[in-house]
Image (cartoon, rainbow, N blue to C red):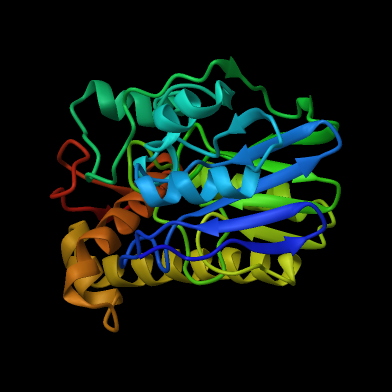
Amino acid sequence: MQMGAEQIAGGVWRLRAGNPSPMTGSGTNSYVLLGPDGAVLIDPGPALPDHLAGLLVVLGNAPLRAVLLSHPHLDHSAGLPALQAATGARSYGFGAADAGRSMPMQRLVDAGLTGGGEGVDADFIPDVAVKDGEILQLAGLQIEAIHTPGHMGAHLCFALAETLFSGDHVMGWSSSLISPPDGDMGQYMESLAKLAARDWQHFYPGHGEIIVDPAARLLELTRHRRAREAAILAALAKAPACPDGLAAQLYTDTPPALLGAAARNILAHLIDLHERKLVTTPQTIAPDAFFHLI
């Protein structure tokens, strides 16, 4: 299934990939920004021939000056090699899949913690590494890169004036999956606050529809995570529990197929609470470890 391209603002086109799923919603959004001197593409999406063909149609005769990657998950990045072969454009990103990883997460990696199979693109290395706050002058456009780790340590959002291309950090249809060690709940909350400190007109997310009230959505996501944290602490006050057990208790409306992802979110909360010395575990931190209140 391939969705048609939509012009969502002056010079901004969205093409949704045909990869709908419980984790990607209606599919991954790719954005083509047409400037006075060519085009910039944000997130090439999955490796689907019809999606590549659609992107090339949107580009038309405009030379592609750069491909910006929000983060190296395969549903956002796997289409990059074919797109570069067709256009010769350079890729821009924060770094490889483990770039931006926090020290607590790195300690857990060194101790043997692995991810939950979220489709990390381990082969991605950007042609151009981008720093937080860097202003990119591309295709006659001025685009600001904003490092927003949380969903992934290497996650970037891209600002074009008061519009933010928010990747998987802020979406309207769902909250972000935070799956350690690639995801970090402490970083995620800090990144929400970082974005909330600025005024935005619209968010264009990596999945789902345009967010027309960014401030309200940022507040909603922050309150959601704080409420989930409070529920975890309340559950642990009754008895020690592991992430799977807590997910079954707290995600009562979640389909069984998504409880594994819910347990990864719970694990992320527990690691953050452990770092803040609010919970502990007699075991090495792991997806099956039992946590206790301190």
- Please give the name of the residue rendered at 73% of the width and 71% of the height, measured from the top-left corner: 212
Q: Quadrant of the N terminus?
A: bottom left
For this orientation, the residue located farthest to the front is 61
- Residue 206 placement (x, y as % from top left): 53, 54
- Residue 4 placement (x, y as % from top left): 53, 65
In the image, 50: left or right of 133? left
- Residue 10 placement (x, y as % from top left): 82, 57
Q: Does any portion of residue 241 appear in the rendered image? A: no
Hey, which quadrant is residue 45 in on the image?
top left
280 or 138: nearer the eye? 138
213 or 32: nearer the eye? 32
289 or 191: nearer the eye? 191
- Please give the name of the residue rendered at 63% of the width and 52% of the height, measured from the top-left corner: 192
- Please give the name of the residue rendered at 85% of the width and 31% of the height, measured from the top-left corner: 140
Say if 253 sits above or below 123 in the image: below
Hey, which quadrant is residue 114 in on the image?
top left
150 or 136: nearer the eye? 136
Q: Does any portion of residue 36 appear in the rendered image? A: yes
